[in-house]
Image (cartoon, rainbow, N blue to C red):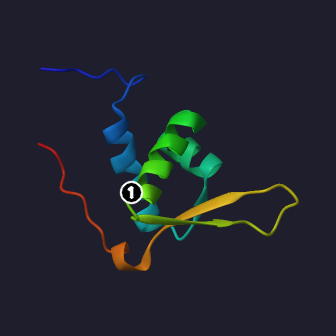
Amino acid sequence: MCVYSPMHRDILMITEEIIKLLSKEEELSIRQISLRVKTHRAVALRSLEFLKRIKLIGERKGEETKRVERLFSLKEAHKNYRLETRS
């Protein structure tokens, strides 16, 4: 049996949290996602890149600021995507 400390979580658990978060929110940046999931930016980015590769989420460039901002959202076909909870 594997016990996780709050400071070290499996990347699959973080990916599940990101999917749940994006199912509730319209569109979020990498920074917003990493702050809400409480993980490092690099880990959140790795998880987002994987979800983008399997075509579960979409990405677009933000236009409101001068800095290049990457915004992520669930694709339309997966808006009602529900993860089964682990027991």
Q: Residue 58 at x, y = what percent? A: 51, 67
Residue 81 versus residue 75: which sits nearer the camera?
75
Judged left or right of residue 53, residue 60 is right
Judged left or right of residue 18, residue 33 is right
Q: Quadrant of residue 83?
A: bottom left
Residue 76 versus residue 25: which sits nearer the camera?
76
Residue that lies at the very extreme toward the front in this rendered image: 53
**Tag count:** 1
Identify the residue at image location x=54%, y=44%.
Answer: 45
Classify the position of the C terminus by image quarter: top left
Label 1 secondary element:
helix
Judged left or right of residue 25, residue 79 is left
Disc 1 packing (10 Å; few <14; some 14–19; many ≥20): many
Residue that lies at the very extreme toward the bottom in this rendered image: 76
Q: Residue 38 at x, y = what percent? A: 51, 37
Identify the residue at image location x=37%, y=57%.
Answer: 20
Identify the residue at image location x=26%, y=64%.
Answer: 82
Identify the residue at image location x=66%, y=58%.
Answer: 70
Q: Residue 72 at x, y = what percent? A: 56, 62
Q: Quadrant of residue 51?
A: bottom left
Mark 1: amino acid = Ile
Q: Is residue 28 above or below residue 87?
A: below
Classify the position of the N terminus by image quarter: top left
Residue 73 versus residue 60: which sits nearer the camera?
60
Q: Which residue is mark 1?
A: 19
Q: Is residue 48 above or below residue 56?
A: above
Q: Residue 15 at x, y = what percent? A: 38, 46
